[in-house]
Image (cartoon, helix red, strand yellow):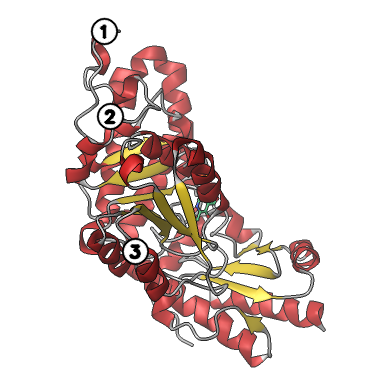
Amino acid sequence: MTIPHDDLLRYRAEFPILSKKVYLNSCSLGALSTRTRAAVNGFMDDWENWGASAWYRDWIGVLADTRREFAMLIGAGEHEIALLPSVSAALGALASGMSSTFTERPEVITTDLDFPTVHYLWQAWHREGVELTVLPGNGVTVPLEQWEASLSPRTALAMTSHVFFTSGAIQDVQVLTEMAHAQGALSVIDAYQGTGQLPTDVKALGVDVLMTGGLKWLLGGPGIVYLYVREGLIPRFEPLLTGWFANQHQFAFDPNRFEYSSDARRFESGTPPLASVFAGRAGLQILNEIGPQRIRERTSALLYDFIDRARARGWDIRGASMEPEQRAGIALMNVADPTGLTAALKERNIILDYRPGAIRYSTYFYNTVEENTMLLEALDELLR
Ligand SMILES: Cc1ncc(COP(=O)(O)O)c(C=O)c1O
């Protein structure tokens, strides 16, 4: 199989782990780049050399810059982006900003394939009257008909993943959003497994809220999450989880003058984790430099190189019926002992991970066919 965009292999030198390991686990943690390390070191240097004046000299600007880089990646405006430390925190801010909605529309719909933190948050909001409906998927995805049948005028939010973390299946969040809107509900998309590896144009998709972060495909590590809220919606939210970074008059330092920021910064709260912001921005710059379309083409080809050769060996890849355009760069392979197999691969310097019942493979623009071959040959021996 020919893998497009071999020119991207020049990036391998920027990711030191790739010379030491066969790294096929970007869906858990994107590889650390020398650029990201340098960015964090730059933050430390600022801190050491300038002390508090680094805030005005540089750091406030870096926050704005980071929002702008993310906005560029998803086709949004900078004013529609907030920086938060985790998806859980972003969801908390969002939920706490719409309490009154739940009186008329108590239902939040999600699926059993969504990331657990989503469930935990909305389960906790039961105390505030939220009724959580969990759509049962088929282990790979949730058919759109199921969404359509469940959405109703009682639904406040359709909250789900762009890409499911235990199957790699891409949901059609554009159609899903149209279905939600037809019932007067909003779509809230957890795009942690999508943005970066998939071209994401929030305006074309029409989604209301989208969140993702540095940890995985955006190459920025932990501690930084990006929250997009559609322009016209922003004034509808008044988060109870708040703080001085959400204040339109932040630098007035006046305890009696709080007004929610007119833009998405109203979802922020306290001092952001700056080291993570620096790392996050460096990751976003790499993504914007390459462009997600090229990343998608390369990642998809590498994924199918692995899947086709695994299937030819009779191995059981989850979601056999999925078309290439429905699959992001993640594949789950059902095996008897995922933990043991993952550990045995690690012994051979091959890094992937596992989820219940399966090993989880993921590939990215910096990976190669040769790395797939090394994995397949190791599996040949280990599964014999
Ligand atoms: C789909 C998805 N959502 C959310 C998260 C993480 O959520 P949080 O930022 O709250 O740790 C992950 C992975 O860690 C994920 O795969």
Q: Is residue 50 visible?
A: yes
Circle 1 Cα neighbour tier, 10 Å, few/some/many (<14 / 14–19 / ≥20): few
The residues bearing labels 1 and 2 have C-alpha atoms spaced at a distance of 26 Å
Mark 1 or mark 3, which is nearer the start of the sequence? 1
Question: Mark 1 or mark 2, which has the lower sequence index?
Answer: 2
Q: What's the residue type where badge 3 is placed? A: Pro
Quadrant of the image for the C terminus?
Answer: bottom right
Query: For the residue labelled by badge 3, is the local secondary structure a helix, a strand or a loop?
Result: helix
At 38% across and 58% down in the image, what residue appears?
Answer: 195
| Mark closer to the observer (1, 2) | 1
| Viewer-side residue, 271 vs 180 | 180
Under mark 2, the amino acid is Gly
Q: Residue at x 57, y 65 (%)?
A: 166
Residue at (56% x, 87% y) in the render: 308
Q: Is residue 56 above or below residue 172?
A: above
Residue 31 image position (x, y, % from top left): 54, 53
Q: Separation of disc 3 and disc 2 at Cα?
A: 25 Å
- Give the residue type that dot 1 points to: Asn
| Circle on res. 61 | 2
Q: Residue at x 25, y 65 (%)?
A: 178
Q: Which residue is mark 1?
A: 256
Find residue 292 and name its label: 3
- The front one of 198 and 130 is 130
Determine which quarter of the picture holds residue 61: top left
Q: Dot 3, how many residues are within 10 Å of its Cα: few (below 14), some (14-19), or many (20+)?
A: many
301 left or right of 28?
A: left
